Amino acid sequence: MSQRKLTDYEQRHCPTCGRTDFDTEKAMKIHHKLSHGESLAKSNEKYQCLVCKNNFGTKQGLNNHISKIHPKVWSRIQEQALTLTPVDPAKKIQGHDQ
């Protein structure tokens, strides 16, 4: 399967906060590291939403997704002080699909 080239918009669109006013992809990545505390460098770690199974490259991206799309789940996570961890693609929970 071939990878498609990202559009200029996708390259300059912050996946965490949605900001789009960057002149270059590099400027967006610097913003992401400074503003959100996580690098967008390629990583094998993926954070998966347990509700809808969408994957996110950063913990902050997953947090933002859950808080906006699944607010009831987010409230439970906050109330119970749960920690979100990366999905390990090599491990499967018995009886569950990834």
Image (spheres, rainbow, N blue to C red):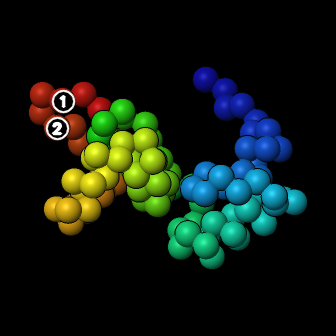
Give the label on residue 69, or none.
none
At x 75%, y 49%, the residue is 11
Q: What residue occupies the far bottom of the structure in this picture?
A: 34
Q: Give coordinates of residue 24: x percent, y percent.
A: 84, 59
Give the image quarter of residue 75: bottom left
Name the residue nearer the viewer: 61 or 74: 74
For the C terminus, the quadrant is top left
Depicted 90 relative to depicted 19: above or below? above
Q: Amino acid at mark 1?
A: His
Q: Is residue 10 left or right of residue 41?
A: right
Q: Which residue is mark 2?
A: 93
Q: Are marks 1 and 2 in contact (CB under 8 Å)?
A: yes
Label 2 crowd (10 A; few <14 / some 14-19 / many >=20)? few
For the N terminus, the quadrant is top right
Distance between mark 1 and mark 2 Cα atoms: 5 Å
Q: Which residue is mark 1?
A: 96
Q: Is residue 32 left or right of residue 74?
A: right
Q: What residue occupies the far right of the structure in this picture?
A: 23
